[in-house]
Structure formats: structure tokens, C-alpha cells
Image (cartoon, helix red, strand yellow):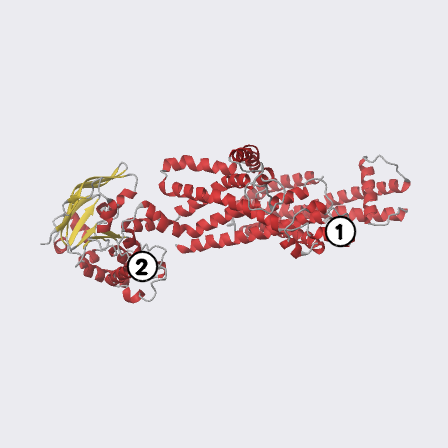
Amino acid sequence: MSNVKIKSKNLNVYYGDKQALFDVNLDLNEKEVTALIGPSGCGKSTFIRCINRMNDVIDICKVTGNIEMDGININDKDLDVVSLRERVGMVFQKPNPFPKSIYDNISYGPKIHGKGETKSELDQIVENSLKKSALWEEVKDRLDEPGTSLSGGQQQRLCIARAISVNPEVILMDEPCSALDPIATAKIEELIDELKKTYTIVIVTHSMAQAVRVSQKTGFFHLGKLIEVGKTEKIFKNPDNKMTQDYITGRFG
Amino acid sequence: MNIVLIFLITIFSVSLFFYGKSKTKTISIKDNIKLNALPKFYGYYLVLWCSIPALVFLLIWSLFEPVIIKSIIIETAANQGAIFSDKNEANLIYEKIKAIHLGTYFGDIDSILKESALAYAKFINLFTNSKVVLIFGIIIASVIYSLKKIKNNNKARDDVEVILKGLLFVSSLIAILTTLGIIFSLLFESIKFFSVINIFDYLFGTNWSPQRAFVRDASSITAAEFEELKDAFGFIPLIAGTSFIAFIAMLVAVPIGLFSGIYMAEYASIKVRRISKPIIEILAGIPTVVYGFFAALTVGPFFRQVGENLGLTVSSESALAAGLIMGIMIIPYVSSLSDDVINSVPQSLRDGSYAVGATKSETIKQVVIPAALPGIIGSVLLAVSRAIGETMIVVMAAGLAANLTINPLESTTTITTQIVMILVGDQEFDSPKTQSAFALGLTLFIATLILNYIAQRAVKKYREKYD
């Protein structure tokens, strides 16, 4: 059994008057892929956005409860969000490369955190990140072309490279394949398999098959509550909860 | 008479609308047939057929009637024995005849004039009567035609669409033709100007003093006068003054406008935004003449006072005062446009930047502004063309002397101000002085056109970015 990297305790999230998460207690294991499934609007994305405090951007959002990463509460007001986000990277639903060159897309993060002081160090970081995201071979000759000129799947891998460029410990993925075709999806899934050797990964997905393929642990959310969590195999073969059973067999959602 | 006719046509059309609507309804019920269009389309169909041919005829008639009557009357007067040597005299006699007819002529009336006036009255009468008869004829004909069509259950919907499309086309044609008309009038007057003044003397001359060029007839300029004229129309001081004042204005407007735009788009809460944005936009609603006297009566003297205290010579009409106030006037343009542009940068880019740990200001500086840059450049260029075209503030606050200077404390002048100066008051239309206004206008038009083109290109490029 691997170590617990992130532990949420009684996590509640409110958007204005509306409560989006109810007392979520969820452990995420180190160097493992945890998949979060559930119908739209059930709070999966809200949950992972708590882990890198992206909800701070939304004015009306209020988060109570604890999220501990390596035993330290990251939902603390005094926590430095910048260094948290350096440790917890994120990949979004739609590829969102900056309208900059491929090189600048990757070097953006390291520069902000003062990593890679010399040009050759930066070059190294860019090359490593692109290699890790399996994009290097495709773009190594055109690093100065805009990131937006790549195909959708390449853009998403570029965004993954951008996330790992600052050398995080955790990578959050919010439906990373929902805008991609099956071939690009297969490439990303392959990549996730590879990345989990180095990083703790949380992936939100609407595809059961994808959850089965990539994850070791699965959590099922419904209407803001964590209904069931367990080993992926168990959740999909023999869930304890009737609702989970109904959802994975496609009876609702 | 024309107003009465238009009124009648309108009333007639409106009543036809209701007639057509109910008529088709009864037809469809009585004969139990399916109409090809909604009853109201038959109403529209009748209205359009009743009004458009009649109105178009009226318009064309009104354009040609005076011309035809005039030529007939002048001919009659000539047959009666009136003597005129050229067109101007003929015009004079025609005006006299008209005045007699209207009873507003108080000079001597000889028999020729009297006879012609009677003839004039006769023709006016004849034309008016035939106009009324023809118009009613047209209305009746077109209404009969369209009623017949309706009875046959025609495809009124398609016909109405075609006619409306035609109307819209004519409207846009009018807008385009007006633009062309303005350009050509500028062009022709400028060509007259450049036939007297060499275009290179104009473009590269450094001295602007058009008041020297009071020449009664451009065709009879002596060599000495020509030498005098040659260096009176130097464009350089004006373009220098214009760019200088616009530059000062942009120095004020771009940073303040851009920063307030960034604040509005990125930092201000919805509440603050809702209150402060309209307040900034009020600045755009203040008439420029108000800015002008604010600059001339408050800011200018204030600068002079401060300058005197510092031991500087400051003219009370200075480029600085005008530029500063002009800049303040332009702030809302820059601010509001760049606010819009920044707002349209997708949130996902900001999220991507926050997610790697960038702070808000880093995100704005390195992701949002670069992404919005083409749009911001567009808004700045639009503001520049606004600054170049601005007149009132400069007239009041920067003075009229065409000094070629880069000292912001001296008075200077701009292209638009000089156009105003040249065309205010009584003018000789043949004098190069007056014609120079058209040349200036043309130059200004070309300059703003180029700027607008660049601005639009920049904005367009921006639009392509995220689609």
C-alpha cells in the first residue's frame, strides 16, 4: 500500500449560497492515479480545484475543512498559493496553450519560479518536459512556432509539459481528453501511465473506460457527496453502493 | 405641394395595407384556398407597390422640374428680346422672373420681364397639375396591377423580400455614394490648389502663412506673386504641430487609459465596475468645446503661472495644455476599448497561468496583455486618429500660429485648426488660400484612413487568434 499524499477532511465548498461539496473525506495515494467519476455538476472538478486552490480565483467561492498534503493543511489562509501551485500542477479540460511559442509556453513556469537561470538550463528544462510529455520528437525542430499552431492532442500534451515544467509533485487533470479524438486520447492515457511513476495524479473523467484503463483508485461523486471510493477494480466490478452500481452500468448520469 | 402629395401617398398606402390584409383573408375563406403567404404580406405588397413607384417618380420629377422650367423660361425671355451675354446674367434674369412671380421683386418691371413672369406662372401651374395627374395615374396603375396579382394568390412573401432587399441595397448605396462624393469634392478642389502651388512645395515647405495669398484670380498670378505664394503653403509646420499635440495627448491617454482598462477588466469587482465604468465614459460624452475652454481658461493660465514661478516662459496658449486636455478627452476611448479587448481574452489562459503558480500581476503582464496586444494597439491607433482629427481644443488652447517647434510650452497649431481658420468668414473660392483648406482636408483624410486601416488590421488579426 502506497503512502497517502493528500488527505481531505470534511471538505465543504460553497458557491455563494449554493453548497457544491458536502463533507468530502478522500485520500489520494502517492504515485498513483486516482480517477474521479460522476455525473456533470457533481463536484469532481470543484474538488480537484481545491487541491491547488484554483477556487481562490472565484470571488464567491468559500472552502471550509482541511486538505492535508504531506501532513500540512493547504487550505490555510496563510499558505503561499504560488509555492503550492508549484507543487500541484493542473491540466484543463480544453487545451489552453498561451499564444506564445512552444518554447515560451514551457519556459513560462520555470521563469516565474526563478528556475533555470541560464539559457542552457532553461533549454534543458524545456527539452525534459517535452520528452516527458512525449511531444519532443514532434516539435523539437519548431520550438519557436506558436503553441496554438499544434493539433488538439499535441496542444494538450504541451499543456501537460507546461504543468510538469516546474517539477510538481501532484498533477491534477480535469477531463483532459474530453476535447480530443480517440487517437490523441490513447496517447494521453499512455502518457498518464508513464507519468504516474513520478507524480501523484488525479484525473476527472466522464469515461468509465478511461477510469478503468488509467486509474488504480476511483472515487464516485454524486450531488456534491463522495458516494464511494476504493480500488478501481472493486468499484467497477463489485461496488458496495447501489448508486455507484447504477452509474457505472449507465442506468443514470 | 410635394408634402401634401407625400402625405396622401402615405395615407393611401396605409389604408391599402388593411384592405389587402382583409381582402386576402376573405378570398381564402370564401374560395377555400391555401394562401401562398400570410395575409399581412399581401398588405405589405400593396403598400410597397402603392408607395415606391409614386415616390420615386416624385423624387425624379422634383429633381428635374426646376432645371427644365429654367431653361424654358430663359429661352422665352430671350425670344421676347431679353439680352444677356453669359450664364450669370441669364441666371440673374431668371431669379428676377421668379421673384416677380412670388411678389418679392421691388425693382422696375419692364414688359419683357412681365411677360416672362406670366409665362413662368403658366409653366409652374402646368407642371404642378401634370405632376399631380401623373402621380395619381401611377398610383392607380400600380395598385390595379398589384390587386390583380393578389387576386391570383401570387407569392407575395418572395416579392416583398425582393423589394425590401432592394431598399436596403439602395440605402447602403447612398452611404457609399456620399463618401465618394466627399472624396471627389476634396480631390477636385485639391487638384485646383496643386495646379497653383507645387505639390512638393506644399509637402516639404516649412512655412505656413496662407493669409499672404490673397490673390483675386489664380490664373493671373505674376511671377513675383508666385514667388511669394510658393513658400506660404508649407505643410511641415502643420503636420509637426498635429503630431506633436497628438503625441502629448497619447502620452497622457495611453498609460492612464490602458491602466484603468486593466483595472476595470482584471481587478475591479462587479460592483465597482458597474459604477466606475459609466463615470469614465461620461468623459467621452463631454462636448469637445467644453474641454476646449477648460484648457484655454483653466489649464493654460495655470501652466503659465507655474512656468513663471519656475522662471520659464510659457505661452498661455501652449501645445502642452492642448495635448494634456486632449489626452484626458481620449482616455475613455483607450480605457473602454482595451477593457473590452482584455475581457475577451479567454479565462482559460489566465487559469493556465495561475495553475503553474503565476501571480495575478505576472499573469496580466506576461499572458493577458501579450494576448490582448493587437487589440490594444488597435484601440490606441483609433485614439490617435481621434486626436489628429480633434479641432476645438486646439483652436482654443494651442493657438493659431504655425510655429515649427518642439517646445511644448510654445503655441503651435494643427491641420484641422488651420482648416477652420481658412474657412471662417467670407472667402474667395478661387483663391489658393481657400483651396489650401481642401488640400489639408485631403491630406488629413488620407492620414486618418491609413491609421484606421492599420487599426482595423490589428483588430482583425486579434480576432483570428482564438477562433
Question: In the image, which disc is placed on residue B225?
Answer: 1
* Marks 1, 2 in one chain: no
Q: Nearer the viewer, residue A94 or A128?
A: A128
Tell me how far mark 1 sits from mark 2, CA to CA: 72 Å
Give the quarter of the figure containing the N terminus of chain B. top right
Mark 2 is surrounded, within 10 Å at the Cα level, by few (under 14), some (14 to 19) or many (20 or more) other residues, namely: many
Q: From where the camera sits, is residue A208 visible?
A: yes
Residue at horizontal 69 percent and vertical 38 percent from the top: B4
- Which residue type does callout 2 highlight? Gln
- Which residue type does callout 1 highlight? Glu
**Label 2, on which residue?**
A155
Left-right relation of B202 to A94: right
Comparing labels 1 and 2, the label whose residue is closer to the camera: 1
Residue at horizontal 79 percent and vertical 46 percent from the top: B69
Question: In the image, which disc is placed on residue B432?
Answer: none
Total numbered labels: 2
Q: Nearer the viewer, residue A205 or B118?
A: A205
